[in-house]
Amino acid sequence: MSEQRTIAVTINGKRHEAAVPVRLTLADFLRQHLKLTGTHLGCEHGVCGACTVLFDGHSARSCLMLAVQADGHDVLTVEGIAPDANTLHPLQQAFHDHHGLQCGFCTPGILTTLIELLRDNPNPTEADIRVGISGNLCRCTGYHNIVAAALEAARRLRSAERAP
Amino acid sequence: MKPPAFSYHDPRSVADAVGLLASLDNAKLLAGGQSLMPMLNMRFVLPDHLIDLNRVEGLNTIREENGALEIGAMTRQRDIEFSDLVRERCPLMHEAIGHVGHRQTRNRGTLGGSLCHLDPAAELVAVAAALDAKLTIAGKNGTRAIDFAAFPVAYMTPALEPDELLTGASFSCWPERHGYSFVEFSRRHGDFAIVSAAALIEEDAHGKVTRASLTLGGMGLAPVRASDVERALIGETIEDKRLREICEPLRKLDAVDDIHAPASYRRQLATVLSRRALFKAHERIAEGPRA
């Protein structure tokens, strides 16, 4: 009944082709069609930031995009952050070490947001981090550990950059 | 939540978009989606047709022409934020854009989307009022220009016909040695302002104000230019006591009462934020050319 289109999207480096209803959000496409349930849905109207993915390298709320808009584009979700199945990304490791996950609901959106932030600003201040994740709500209200983890990840990424 | 069913159209040109607007009933334009998508998800709007402008060519541009910045309607707020041209020639807009939403929403949100959504507390809407923006609108009979001052016709309602779309806006640049400041009060970083103040001034060699623009956002149905204050500033030397006197009449401005703040609080904010913005603008002239 509802209008459909065939789209081709690169997600975490892998090309996916699918027929989708035109009204399907990118978030629901990831979660329901591709079973990539790492992307969480909190508010579904662009406030909480849990569904943040990188769209062509830039953070975006996947609940505020349509799957058809991703046709021909590149999406990175939280599942695509780690280098392989047995190794955590330095940012993920720092979250583990600093207990930055807490209940874990906001974590996927915060990780994707911070991947962009640390790429664009490898040496952020605490204030930069706090402003950077101001669009991500953590209802455990434990931003302290998240900020500490982000700063630690920035340090580790910088020293990895310096290493031969 | 998911959007209601609609037919989806993704034209590649302004002409095609206008053609679709003219031929389809109950169509809605989708720009960056940072306001319309929540409204669709919550079913506040129920369009039969969605016309997505994200694949339209030529609307994502920032260029300087005849002393003005011409910015295409589909220019992302992110691109405005990181544009050297905007920072150098329209520093007020650069300062204001940092208050617009969050990194994730600025990456998608557009200038045209913000101007047409026309939230009275939106920062880019206040900047358009402050800089006397001229808007270019495309329709089936060609394009027309309109002053931003005539654009808001009612609460969140732009002066657009059903078959028209905004293609860009022109912001005249102030001379290099001008002062500017954008300040706002909101409860949380990234929220719409409860009240915002945008100030621009020029001074002569003796420090007397020769030109002033003062805009208040969040007070009413659209941003308001405080033209009485702008006039009162001419010929004045900006210092604290005199600025307080000049800004005092702002306590009588019309203001809305809503869940966020009573009108009396908005008037207080308007008075205080105007003073701070004008003073900061004055200080920036004294600081000399921008680095």
Image (cartoon, helix red, strand yellow):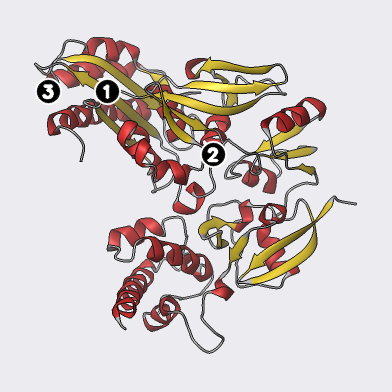
Residue A96 visible in rendering? yes
Marks 1/2: CA–CA distance: 25 Å
Task: Say what amino acid the circle numbered 1 marks.
Answer: Pro
What residue is pinned by disc 1? Answer: B175
Tell me, yes or no, whether the two marked residues, 3 and 2, touch with CB atoms within 8 Å. no
Residue B49 percent coordinates (x, y)? 78, 38
Disc 1 residue crowd, few under 14, some 14–19, many 20+, Cα 10 Å: few
| Chain letter for mark 3 | B
Residue B88 in the image: above or below residue B215: below
* Figure quadrant of the N terminus of chain B: bottom right
First along the sequence among labels 3 and 1: 1
**At numbered mark 2, what does the secondary structure look like: helix, strand or loop?**
loop
Q: Depth-wise, is mark 3 or mark 1 nearer the camera? A: 1
Task: Say what amino acid the circle numbered 3 marks.
Answer: Glu
**At numbered mark 3, what does the secondary structure look like: helix, strand or loop?**
loop
First along the sequence among labels 1 and 2: 2
Q: Is residue B33 left or right of residue A116?
A: right
Q: Is residue B72 left or right of residue B185?
A: right
Disc 2 residue crowd, few under 14, some 14–19, many 20+, Cα 10 Å: some
What residue is pinned by disc 3? Answer: B239
